[in-house]
Amino acid sequence: MTTTLKPVDAVLVGFGWTGAIMGQQLADAGLSVLALERGPWRDTATDFATGFAQDELRYMWRHHLFQNVTDDTLTVRNHLDQEALPMRHLGSFLLGTGVGSGGVHWNGQIWRFLPSDFQTKSHNQQRYGAKAVSDYDLTVQDWGVTYDELEPHYDTFDKLCGTSGKAGNLNGQIQAGGNPFEGARANEYPTPPMTQTYGPTLFGQAAAELGHHPFPHPTGNLSQPYVNPLGAQLGKCTYCGFCEKFGCGNYSKASPQTTILPYLMAKPNFTLKTECEVLRVELSADRKRATGVTYVNSAGEEFFQPAEMVILSAYVLQNVRLLLLSGIGKPYDPKTGEGVVGKNYAYQTMSSVNVFFDDKLINPFIGAGALATVIDDFNGDNFDHSGLGFIGGAYVGGMVTGGRPIEMIYTPQGVPAWGLEWKQAAAKNYLRSFSFSIHGSCMSHRGNYLDLDPTYRDVHGRPMLRMTFDFTDNEHKMSDYVTDKAVEVAKAMNPREFKVNRRTGSWSVTPYQTTHNTGGAIMGDNPRDSVVNKFLQTWDVPNVFSLGSGAFPQNAGYNPTGTVAALAYHAAHEITTRYIKAPGPLVAA
Amino acid sequence: MGSAGAAAAAGIHDGELGAPPQTYTGKVPWQEGAADAPPAALGTDFRFFTPAERSFIEAAVNRLIPPDPAGPSAVEANVPFFLDRQLAGPFGRGDHYFLGGPWKKGAAEQGYQMRFSPAQLYRAAIKAVDDYAAANFHGAAFASLADADKDKLLKGLEAGTVQLGDGVDAKSFFAMLLQNTKEGYFSDPLYGGNKDMAAWKMIGFPGAHYDYSEWVTRHGEKVPYPTVGMKGRPGWSES
Ligand SMILES: Cc1cc2nc3c(=O)[nH]c(=O)nc-3n(C[C@H](O)[C@H](O)[C@H](O)COP(=O)(O)OP(=O)(O)OC[C@H]3O[C@@H](n4cnc5c(N)ncnc54)[C@H](O)[C@@H]3O)c2cc1C
Ligand code: SF4
């Protein structure tokens, strides 16, 4: 039996980064807001206090904070002719759950995409010709929103987090010490950049010698104490080295907990319900309006929650699945290329280079989630792609996020994974090595998409999401090209030796790569090519909004959350200033 | 599940399954003194492995991380005890694994595809490897093989060139065994392995510290901090 509850103005499905941002914006506009979160409540003192936060086994390997896939996972395959099978254990990406979700156990790498990233199709077409964007069956698109439109909202997120960094482009003026390739920012970062440890410093010196433009990675690990505009206080990062995949015990990592919740939870017009999983969005008989959502709680009770507005903030994979399960938008068909929901699923193309020294103590355990010196010279369209045979790029970062020994012992080329040789190499190299991360874009492709699995079902009997994905030649060529550039930096450091871990072969569910899944609920300027408009409003059902990286028509060579947050603020601004006065489509179809 | 006592009373639990639904409005629902502290491995007895399985495990993990002057072997680091407690607990039961059907073989890229929980897999695989050893090495169990033969067999499992019976995928078992062995070697001693933090000392990892501020700019210097586990830290409480 389903119990019908009292209506609310807005219901949020999921309460991670996007849910918290939108919840705060809508609650401040005076709406009655209810957040439904499938996982538990979490706070710093209870769940990741400094007495036990530095537990590699429990948090990283036993997935203590991550989604438990026991009763719901997704199925995966590389291409259409294969049968998709369930991802039985998390690996390639570590899906979040619970209040704060990925915002709790992220690195805090805060990026803006390049202005040209928002025009992937038109920009590359204009510069390199039509073939550049159609080779390899690419299906790249423009976003329908520009960097300039998002700039104030990127700025809002920086101020929320207290992002530590150095501007490289202030209102068009290139600044020493920052990223000279970035889009113009109206303001300097709220706090100065992190102090670099030894590894990133060596990387920066070598990159500069080669004529590149190194700068400190912008971080949500704070270089100094900070009070944000919502009155939330963050502390100074202590370089504990248990950052990504862990919660921060020091209140030094920007997260919904440290930046929004103290403010939002105190508001009387905001309510959070935990252990409540939304099964689907309910639509009116004409399917043009959402009436609310149906959810089931951990006691097994089912409810219908009526709402004037439904905000999907359940992370890209569950957002797309809920759209498909609820019949919102036309599902994408990779054979005909028709339909949009599930289209252009993309990811991140990662490779790395490990460097080993005899004479330098790197001390990798002194680290932070976003601690790196990076070069952006080979990202996006920051370099001439003529004749290279690919579009896109990557940043290269000399990163030291920590030295957690189960995950992060590097051994030289040719050393086996176990036995005496491995043991001796681990003992010899642990303190004297570190890694460069080559963090690459991933263009969208006709055959990469999300739909509902025909066979596997979750504990509620709903079809699981099915992911069909592989890297294309465009991605392999891009990754090899930028990895070669990273190798040049490695050589310039004069290490004893180095090891190159290229992005070879097909995408695999192990090992961990990134939790930067994108697409499937893509944005654009018309309903034929996209699921949502530039304000993340679904074209088909105007009182349903889909937040998060699902809106990316393809993925850029940066971590996504800065852009995810900017898009959420951009949408929130339009909802609170226009939509609530006159509900309806915010962009004419 | 999470540690008993205070944590259970506060409604805190391991992962998102099984907690009661809650409604929060008007305040941050923080509870004084509540702590989701980790569950320590207690006792010294073996609860999961039979004596024959224990012989296999000791022999296998000591080939994965053998004795030498640089640091402890896996057995010296108490990895078999760690594995026993892991397999007797939530990990062994397949907490955080989806084990529903149908079960198909799949491509390597699709990852783990067996129906077995980790505990079931160890049980079946140890028998299957011992059967294989007996059939191919003159009736001997794995533990009584010469080191070179043990390594040969382990390499065969790793590469998937050794075919095992009883529905055991050799490669998946080897990958799990190696991963769990490194976990027992390098995880906090709280979980029963990494005895005396000797594996951490071997590589130079100082352990569960939480503040390296002083050392950020002291490039290339040796950090003189004593090695500590979570239990050695202020703020640790056995809740
Ligand atoms: C280890 C790790 C490191 C990362 N590092 C970085 C980084 O450095 N920089 C960066 O930019 N990004 C990083 N990310 C990615 C970042 O965490 C995500 O981009 C961000 O959290 C996405 O926010 P979201 O609101 O879309 O989803 P989430 O924060 O995941 O929140 C979604 C919420 O919805 C809930 N939910 C899902 N389905 C339902 C349902 N049906 N009913 C109710 N609730 C539901 C989930 O439980 C979850 O709480 C990292 C991620 C991981 C895992
Ligand atoms: S590295 Fe810094 S921000 Fe990250 S968890 Fe540790 S103290 Fe917090």
Image: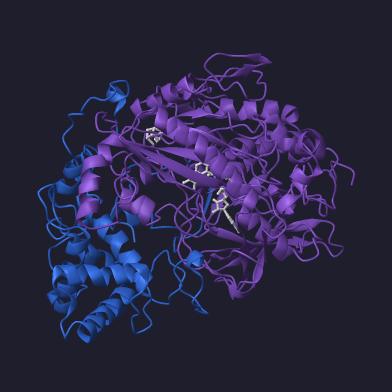
Residue B139 in the image: x percent, y percent? 16, 86
Dividing the image into 4 quarters, which one contains the N terminus of chain A? bottom right
Nearer-the-camera pick, A291 or A413: A413
Residue lying farthest to the front in this orientation: A387
Left or right: A582 in relation to B51: right
Residue lying farthest to the left in this orientation: B69
Q: Quadrant of residue B169?
A: bottom left
In the rendered image of this protein, does residue B99 appear above or below residue A172? below
Residue A520 in the image: x percent, y percent? 69, 54
Q: Which residue is pictured at 60% across the width and 35% down the height? A: A562
Nearer-the-camera pick, A389 or A190: A389
In the rendered image of this protein, does residue A466 appear above or below residue A159? below
In the rendered image of this protein, does residue B45 appear above or below residue A569? below
Report whether residue A109 is seen.
Answer: no
Residue B137 in the image: x percent, y percent? 19, 82
Residue lying farthest to the right in this orientation: A588
Residue B88 in the image: x percent, y percent? 26, 69
Nearer-the-camera pick, A177 or A150: A177
What colour-coding does the image apply? Answer: by chain
Q: Quadrant of residue B185?
A: bottom left
Chain coloured blue here = B
Left or right: A527 in relation to A419: right
Chain coloured purple here = A
Q: Quadrant of residue B86?
A: bottom left
Report whether residue A28 is seen.
Answer: yes
Left or right: A544 in relation to B166: right
Q: Which residue is pictured at 49% across the width and 50% down the height? A: A513
